[in-house]
Amino acid sequence: MDMPDHTTHTTQNEIYTLLKSPASGDVIRGLKELRKETFNTDMASFLLGMSWFHPNAMIRRRVKYVLFNGVSEDFAQFLKGKWRYLPNPPITKVWELMEYLITHPLINTTLLRSWAYRPYLQHKQLNLEKQKLHYLSSELAAFKHLKTLNLNHNHLLTLPPELGKLKKLENLSLAYNQIAILPDQVKKLKKLRQLDLTANQGLNNLPREIAQLQNLTTLNLSQNNFQELPLSVCNIESLEELNLAHNQLTGLPEEFTQLPKLKKLNLSNNQLTKLPVKVLCQLENLSTLIIAGNALSELPLKLIKAPRLKKIHLQDIPTLTAQKQELQENFAPIKLIF
């Protein structure tokens, strides 16, 4: 695509001003001016975005006409068939289009993205739940203001390294996918507070870099296949709530005592036949312990020594339910929930 710039700087600015106007009459006037010019690649990129994403259908048609008559035949062929306008297109459709368009070496991707993501760029939340996604577009990097990203119930196998560019992200939900490995770039999410990895059946380890998430307070690893707890979890000193329910755990490593801020621990429906009392008693801020649905035969009285333990969930443990009255007396004032 060879589009020499014959317009003067002033003329170019004047045309840009008209095209950006909210008044359709100004825009049409700008398009008429363009017909007299041979516009440059920046203008082509601007018009390209305008022809797809401008809210006025009549203007989109006019822009398309001007664009196709002002670019080379090769470039027009590259664009052919890419104008199936959808009102308020879902972001996944926009990504699909963008992934194609930005492959052209002479497209100004910044200008194109300013059109493509106009409804989204300032958003702090993005919900992509149940979108049948098999991969996550690298275009995600454009959403720099995101604080919450919901990708639950998709078909994701992995995550792009561009995830690490979401510097403001605080809540990341990846539940019910097929993620086996988190990328190392997760360590760049310095503001991340909540991470949900529920039901990613290929997940059996976590990168050591996860320990660099110094603001992570809530981690959900339930419904996975952990037979042993990854030691990297034990290094997240900021953790306050950890959900390990519905795994294959038979115990906890000694390193688990390195979680000084942990307040709530869910170990329900694992393979525990006895409790790691020594470890649990060293968690100085643990207040809620959920051990329902395990094959426990006793509740060790030594648990009383846990400094701030106030509540223990014991549902679906027949052996302990039969001892309910005795246990409640022995463990007062800790509340036992059967």
Image: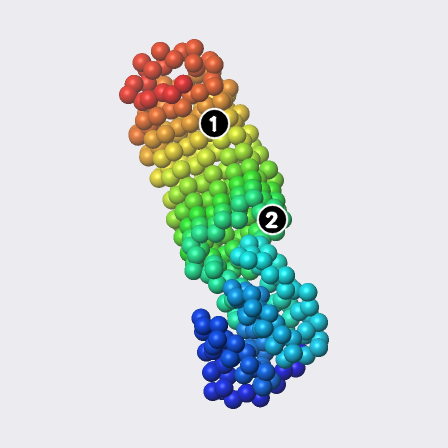
Which callout, 2 or 1, points to the residue nearer the camera? 2
Circle 2 is placed at which residue position?
133
Residue drawn at (47%, 19%) of the image: 316
Tell me if I can see residue 104 in this picture.
Answer: yes
How far across and how far down the image is residue 70, in percent? 63, 80
Considering the numbered disc 1 on the image, is that residue within a helix, a strand or a loop? loop
Look at the image and tell me in which quarter the N terminus lies: bottom right
Residue drawn at (42%, 41%) of the image: 218
Considering the numbered disc 2 on the image, is that residue within a helix, a strand or a loop? loop
How far across and how far down the image is residue 51, in percent? 58, 69
- Which of these two is toward me, 262 or 27? 27
Amino acid at the residue labelled 1:
Ser
Residue drawn at (44%, 52%) of the image: 125
The disc placed on residue 18 is none
Give the vertical position of 214 relative to 276 (above or below).
below
How far across and how far down the image is residue 287, in percent? 34, 31
Tell me if I can see residue 138 in this picture.
Answer: no
| Drawn side of residue 49 relative to residue 124, left or right | right
Disc 2 from disc 1: Cα separation: 30 Å
Circle 1 is placed at which residue position?
268
- Which of these two is toward me, 309 or 79? 79
How far across and how far down the image is residue 279, in percent? 41, 30
